[in-house]
Amino acid sequence: MATFATSDQLLVIIDQAARQTDGESVRIAKDVLSAGAAAKLCLPEGPEEFARALDRRGSRRPVVIGDGRALVRAVTLLHRQRELAGCALSVVPVGDTALAESLGVPGGAVAAARAVLDGAERRLDLLVDDSDGVVLGALGIPPAPGRAVAARPVPIASGRPWYRSLVRTLASRPARLPAVPSPCAARLRVEVDGRTVVDLDQPVETVSVTPGTDGVASVEVRPLSVGAEATPLLASGRSVTVTGADFRYRADAAVSGPVRRRTWRVAEGAWGLVLPADR
């Protein structure tokens, strides 16, 4: 694992939602990072400015201060620009910290900022779907009930056409739809590496897919139980295809769909996240 000296130049992108949600944690993180490294601060007002700042990072190491959606946005941008392989991301989670913490990032602003300065890059697997969407932490079908944020209109400024196209894509997919309660059962065909784990004739309660660190994803299918709890069906593989009638899914912090078919493939060691050196 590569380690970083505190003299590194950093590009600190402070997500707009983080500034609005917890300004005190943002201030603390800025102070720690600025005291330990040459940090250039960027306060984007929306997804297009976020994308522009990341694109113009130069040799600076990008640090995202924000929630799980901000982290997914950064990884998505780098993935679609095919720049993930040469870029180690750091994150100081502010707001919803669940995704970052599940990946090993400390939850507190001070501890997370210290990890940015003193940590080590760890290469992590990524799930990439057939629409070029990414999943960092977990995928759930149907989406579990919970709080979701509705998408906001994004003004498209003049400039390079690929920026406008990319921003429209990120603003619309994955769609941040209101969370829908899981129905009592869904009829889905789940295939892992071409092998059918469950077919349409067997109703299921949930399907979960989690990327690992060794090039395979873990898949758990819970069949609909009547009376005693049914034994989960477990599988692992590099490719997961789900087919069904207009299903939605939760990928990290966003709900997407409905779709009738979606395939996710594991991209082994596709992205780097700076974590505490002892992780």
Image: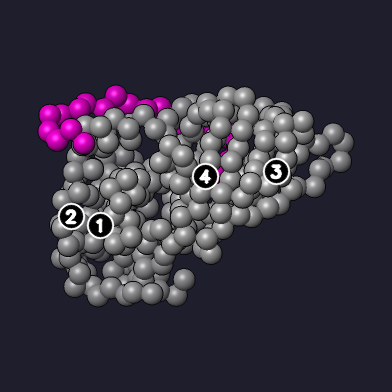
Residue 235 x/y as whole percent: 68, 53
Q: What is the C-alpha distance between the residues marked 4 and 2? A: 30 Å
The mark found on residue 196 in the picture is: 3
* Residue type, numbered disc 2: Arg
Q: What is the C-alpha distance between the residues marked 2 and 1? A: 7 Å
User: Considering the image in quadrants, where does the N terminus appear?
Assistant: bottom left
Relative to residue 113, is residue 125 drawn left or right? Answer: right
Q: Secondary structure at mark 4?
A: strand
- Please give the range of residues in magenta: 138-162
Circle nearer the viewer, 3 or 2: 3
Q: Does residue 95 appear in this view?
A: no
Circle nearer the viewer, 3 or 4: 3
Q: What is the C-alpha distance between the residues marked 1 and 4? A: 27 Å
* Mark 2 in CB contact with mark 1 (< 8 angstroms): yes
Q: Secondary structure at mark 3?
A: strand
* Figure label count: 4
Relative to residue 33, is residue 267 drawn left or right? Answer: right
Q: Is residue 148 magenta?
A: yes
Q: Which residue is mark 1?
A: 62
Of callouts 2 and 1, which one flags the residue occurring earlier in the amino acid sequence?
2
Q: Which residue is mark 2?
A: 57
Main secondary structure found in the magenta portion? loop
